[in-house]
Every structure is written in C-alpha cells, then in structure tokens.
Amino acid sequence: MAITGDDVTLDEIIPISYDFSVVEVSSPDELAVVGADTRVRVTFLEEELELKLPFGSHSRLFLGEVNRAWSDVCEQYPKREPKFDWLTKYHKVERGARSLRKSIAATRGKMSQSKKSGRGDSSGQKRDEERSGGHSVCESQERVKGEARDDLIRNSQHILANKDQMLGMPQFGLRDNLIKCELLKSEDAYTYIQNYSFFLGTYNVNGQNPKESLSAWLSSTAAPPDFYLVGFQELDLSKEAFLFNDTPKEPEWMLAVYKGLHPDAKYALVKLVRLVGIMLLFYVKAEHAAHISEVEAETVGTGVMGRMGNKGAVAIRFQFHNSDICVVNSHLAAHTEEFERRNQDFKDICRRIQFGQDNPTLPPLTIMKHNVVLWLGDLNYRITDLEVDHVKDLIAKKDFETLCNHDQLKRQMDEEVVFVGFTEGEIDFQPTYKYDTGSDQWDTSEKCRVPAWCDRILWRGKSIKQLNYQSHMTLRTSDHKPVSSLLEIGIKLVNEESYKRTFEEIVRRIDRLENDCIPSVTVSQIEFLFKDVKFMQHQAQTVTVLNDGQVPCQFEFIPKLEEPAYSKPWLTANPAKGFLAQGGSVDIDLEVFVNRSTAPELNSGQQQLEDILVLHLERGKDYFISITGSYLPSCFGSSLGTLCLLREPIQEMPLEAVHELSMKSSQASNPETDKPQEIPKELWMMVDHLFRYAKKQGDLFQQPGLRSEFEEIRDCLDTGSLDTLPGSNHSVAEALLLFLDALPEPVVPFAFYTLCLDCSADSGQCRQMVSILPPCHRNVFNYLTAFLQELLKHSAHNRLDAGVLGPIFAGLLLRSPTKQDLTEKRKAKEFFQHFLSQPPADSDSDEKPPE
C-alpha cells in the first residue's frame, strides 16, 4: 500500500468522462457471502476491463470515489467534454482520432443507465449507506470537499487495520515505521468507542439432525444483535466424518441456523469453518459487512497424537473497524476425571492456532494477540465431589452458587491454570448436560451421569459487558441444552478529523528528529547451550535485546547465505522480528523442539544441535548468536533397522556406536555377524504392555494420553530404567502411535507404497506384498496386525472394530512419501483391512520379545 507519491507508479490511465462507466457484475451467489471479492466491469470507449476488488470497506470507498468523480464530470462539464492533455505521457499507443463528444440526450441516457446500476442515484446512495453504517461515501467526501487534500494522510488511513503489518512491512523506511509506531501509541487520541451487540451460542447436538426450530435459542433477544457467532459440537459422530472430515449434516444445520436468526434484521454469512463435528458460523448484519476485513479461519485437532479432529477447536479472526476479534469454538476432552487433559487441550489450542497475515514475511497471529477473544463450546468441565442425588437436589433448590463451588472450570480458573485473563458471567441456569434425548429428564442410562455445565461461553478484552447468559430448555434434540450469551462490546472507530490532526502533529515532530544515526543494540548473551535435549520435549532460553542507540530500530533474524530459513527446523526465535523504541528492550525466546521430522537425522548423527542466528538491524550491523546443544538419542525417530541391531537401550550406548549402527542398518547387513533382533525391543514393550493391561480398555487409540506420562514412557524406553512402562493405557497407546509416526522409513517402506495401493483390492496380492518386505519390516507388520486382531476379539469391552483401527494404523504403516490424497487414504485403509479380517500369513516373527 502506498504512503507517499514515491510509492506509486502509473502505467496507463483511463480518464473518468462521459464515456466511462463502472458496473458491479458479481453474481447474486457471490454477493450473498460476505468476504467474497467484488467484481466490477470498467468500460471506456472501446476498452473494457473486468476487475476483482478485495472484500472490505476500502474497495467500497474506492467505488464511492469513482462514483463521485463521474458525477462531478456531469455537473462541471454539462456542455463540453473535459480535456485530459496531461494524460498524453501515459498513452502507450496512439488510439487515433475518436470523438469524445456525445449529445445531451445520450448523456442523459448514460446518467439514467448509471442510476439503474446504482451509480450516483438515490437507491445506490441508500445501498452505500447501508454498507457503511448509515452514512454514504458521497456524504463523507462532501465534508472534506474544498479542503486541501493531503495524499500522505488520506492514503495512510488504511494502515490502521493491521498493527503488526504496520510495524513490519519491508518496503517502508525507518521514518514511515516511526510514524506508524507513534500512531499506535496515540490511538486513543483519534478513536472512540461504539458499542455493538454480539450473540454467542454453543450447542452440542450429539450427532442428531435438526428436528426443531432454533428460533427459541437464536432469536431469544428482544432486539436483533449486530453479530451472530454460533458454535456446534458433535455435528456428526459417524466414522466417515471422523476419518475424512466430510458430513452431509453441515448444510442441514447451516440452514437451520439461518432460519432461526432474528427476523427483524437482514444477516449475511461471513465465514463457516468446521473440523469433523466442530463447526462455527459467523453472521453479521448487512449494514456492518463493509467494515469487516482480514477474515481468517483455522482449525486444530487435539485428539489422539494431538492431531485427530474428534476433539479440538475451530477459530475465526477478523477486523471490525479498528478492533481485531478472535472467536474460538472448542470441544475438549471428555470424562469427569480428565480435567488435566482438558487443561492440556486448552493450552495446545492456544499454542497451535496461528493465523497467517497478508504479508508472508510477518509472523502469524496467535489467539491472544487480539483485542477481543470470545471462547465458546463444549468445554466438558464437570461438577465433582458431590453425589448425583445431592447435585440434583441443589438444582431443584436453584442453589447454583453451591454447585459452582464444585465446578472444575471455576476451580481451574481460580488456580490460574487455564483461561487466565478470561471472564465468565454468573451462572444462574441449571446444568446443560446430560439429559435423555428428546426430553428434559436427567440421564437415566446405566451410567447416570452427574449433571454438569459442560457448555460455556467466556471472553477476554476491554469494554465488554454481558447482557445475559442463559440456557434454552425448550430445545430437546440433543442430550445437551444450547447456551447463549449476549455481549455488548466496545469497538474502536476512527474519527477522521482527529486522525488527520494527530497524523500531522506526529509528522512535524518526527521531522525534527535526527534519523540518520546508525541504530545500535546490546545483546545480553551470544552463546547458548541446550543440555540433554529430548524428543518432543520443549526447551527455551531467553536473550534480551536492548536498544541503546539514539533512534528506534527494526530488527529481524535473517537467513544465512544459501539457506532457506533463518534457523534450523528444530530451533525457533520468538519474536523473529520486531521494532524497538529508543531505550526499549525485548525478550526473545530461543526455543528448541525436536519432533518427528528432525529426530531421524539427530539420532543417526547426520545432524548436530548446532546453529548460528544472524540478528540483523535495519540500516545497522548484524549480531551473531551461537546455539549448541547435546541431543539424547531416542528410539523415537530411529529406524527399525537400527533398533533391531541395538543390544542395549539407545541412551546406554556411546553416541559413536549408535551412529555406526545407524549407518550399518542402511547397508546390506551380514546375518552371521550382525544377527539383528526380529523386532525392536521398545516396540515389543509397548505392545506387550497393552496386550497385558489394555485389551478391554475403552476408547483405546482414540483418547489421547497425558504429555507428562508420554515423557516418562519415552525415558523408560530410551534408558531401560524400568521393566514395566509407567503411565495410563491411553498414554502407552499414544506413545505407540507416535513411535510409528516418527519412523524415518515406515513399516511398509516408501519403495513399496505404490505397489501396495495398486493391489489393495486383492487380499492374496496384499499378503504376497507383505511377504517380500525387508525382514524387520515384515516382522513388525505381522506382529502389529496379530496384536490388533487380539484387540478385536475383545470388541464387546473395548468397543473397537476394524473400521476404527484400520484407518488409524493404515495411515501410519503405509505412509506416503508425499502428501496423501483422499483416494490414497481409502486404498491404504482397504489394503490394511485385509490383515484385520483374517490371521496374517506366517512370518519370521514368533511374536515373543527379542532376547
């Protein structure tokens, strides 16, 4: 975006004259969805252009300016065509003599036509008024007509939208960044607060279809709200939805919501985002649509392996006027005793949801980087330490205060474990879970669950007032009751005159500064050592950068010569770029995290924990920060061939020996001297543990374990410190999945992947393909399938079937060397199903632990 005239180049200009017209040509379907581009057709004599303008108020402002200019031509030159002699230098080709004059009748006809298309007429003005909150673009321009126009001021107004972008755009020099920084600091001088109503709703529909009107929930407010943010959980509980993230219930519930919106206003859909059964819908009053921009959506699964979408969150962020807002709809881990897993889910969602910015050089935005954060969903926190009859008795007495004292979420928030800085209104309605479907009767099933406030709405930010917080008992489709909250949120609006005065004052003040000094900083430490780094265990150290120079400065970590990124993939600097005022300082977290993609080369010795970060100052010098560390090799991320050659736990062997075995495993081995084990002992320990203790465990491989327990299991396998594995069955099961996922070469090697898919329909060919796998890979494949068949024998207890286990293990054992498409997923599942329905072919493995 241009700030000064130097930032603009003109290639060719089309003059706005009698022969000029611009007509919006977006289809009705496009106009029905807020956020879609606006398409317009521009014509001038024999030229015709079709343009796509990005959604937002700035495009509307541009069209309003064009409309006003065309009207001015008609008013100022009623009898003659205006001259555009100054345009000569922009004409690439001589078009020849073409008459620009039109008769008065033709001119009137053109004006009449423009009125029909919404340019310069009362209906078009009314439409602009609706889109800009009741004030037409033409009216706003008339207020400044006759004043000296300062292009620098006018063209800089749009930079207010994204504050991070304002501070980081590389094409601007130091002076422009100073202006932006001062504008941010003085924001209160040119903005004012105006309240808007936000309706937030959450409903766990338990996989049901919409069977009743949602008006009692969505239209429960007296006046129509300005915004609707409606979240659903468990939209579809089918395996197809879980495995392929596809469901026919999305349009059904979307239509039910649309029909249930307040009848006294017109609403447009801004965004829909869904992850399996977690869906979030964002509607806005039509008159506010033009002031919404930067709409982005993200999803994150927190199920098994921290990725599967049966649990997790979806989020939408957007800019409204001068405030940025993020809305999160989450479904956290279930079961009364699993509050720690819910806490972990919340932290994972906050860490992993990141919104990309228009400028790809800028770091992504996290949830907490917004002025306003709205969080809703089935958070699954329960009421504890009270018997079910006592809870129901307190509900009958409406003693919700006593019940709240036993609410897990309230307790965790009081201890500042989760939702720090968030607020929830007072709960004066009865628990929303669990009811018999189709009734208002508490759960009469065998489990007879204790009633709980699973469905919650919280917020974070300033100038927010809750007008009501309630459940809606008349809806009986699900075993949950929907919940709603009406919030009044103060939004920052820009006063154009105040902004102009503030901007001019800042420019005058900065003009007096000496900005030709070389920036300088002091770095607190330039050498960092990370000791005993482990697989999937985060380590961080902090470096402080102090601006001790005479001017503000902009810093950034830059890539070294011929390297794609500023750091190795296991290292991150946060923030990686920023702006420092004079005398200011910033703490930069240097974070080391080894995952499935970086562990193999570290385990094999091909890479070391060594890197140098280059901290670059704009218009200044570079600072070099050295990073070294010691990595403890792990069975996670090691190849099957290497693990089968290990005689001792991997961390009990010298590093040189581990690296030598890694090299040997990639070469043809000598069976007389090497004598590898049939399967890795680490794999056997996990499978044997599950075989002994988890054959009847419910939700195995579907419910995630705890991060702390995984770390204990990893250390036990890598050091051999214990004969039995610690942690819950779910943690051991997840460790097994993570082990398979981290293998550099999957159980079915990449070279066999396409061949296996090609024969996926033929059971005999599939078994023949397994029989020719390398010995240790074949043994592991047969060993795992034998174990899974044993689990299926106990399906009455563990509720597992081939439809659940097949896709999970097929995706791990038959990994694609590239990104796997939907067709490949289905073929991989079909291939693996053959080995779950019948006993596998004989193998070299006797399914006993290796000696």
Image (cartoon, rainbow, N blue to C red):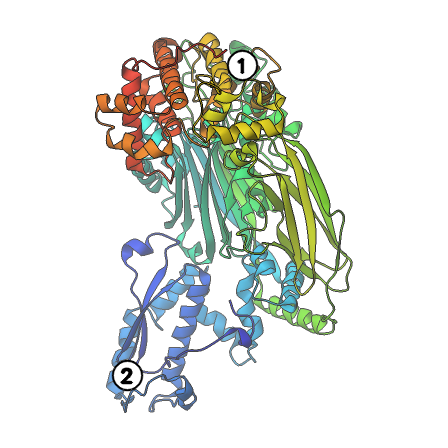
Instruction: Count all numbered tags in the image, as a single digit.
Output: 2
Q: Residue at x 74, y 71 (%)?
A: 513
Percent from the top left, x then y, of residue 201? 45, 36
Q: Tell me the quarter of the picture where residue 217 sits.
A: top left
**Sequence order check, earlier mark of 2 and 1:** 2
Camera sees residue 334:
no
Q: Amino acid at mark 1?
A: Val
**Within 10 Å of the Cα at label 1, are there few (<14), some (14-19), or many (20+) other Cα atoms?**
many
The answer to whether 510 appears left or right of 646 in the picture is right
Percent from the top left, x then y, of residue 607? 57, 39
Percent from the top left, x then y, of residue 516? 72, 71
| Residue that badge 1 annotates | 391
Q: Secondary structure at mark 2?
A: helix
The answer to whether 87 appears left or right of 344 in the picture is left
Q: Amino acid at mark 2?
A: Thr
Q: Residue at x 61, y 29 (%)?
A: 655
Camera sees residue 263:
yes
Location of residue 147 with respect to 767 vertically, above or below: below
Q: Residue at x 70, y 55 (%)?
A: 623
Disc 2, disc 1: CB below 8 Å? no
The label number, if any, that marks residue 107 in the structure image: 2
Q: Secondary structure at mark 1?
A: helix
The answer to whether 551 appears left or right of 357 in the picture is right
**Within 10 Å of the Cα at label 2, are there few (<14), some (14-19), or many (20+) other Cα atoms?**
some
Location of residue 600 with respect to 357 vertically, above or below: above
Relative to the observer, which residue lies in front, 560 or 518?
A: 560
Relative to the observer, which residue lies in front, 284 or 11?
A: 11
Q: Give how far apart the Cα atoms at labels 2 and 1 are.
A: 78 Å
Location of residue 211 with respect to 15 vertically, above or below: above
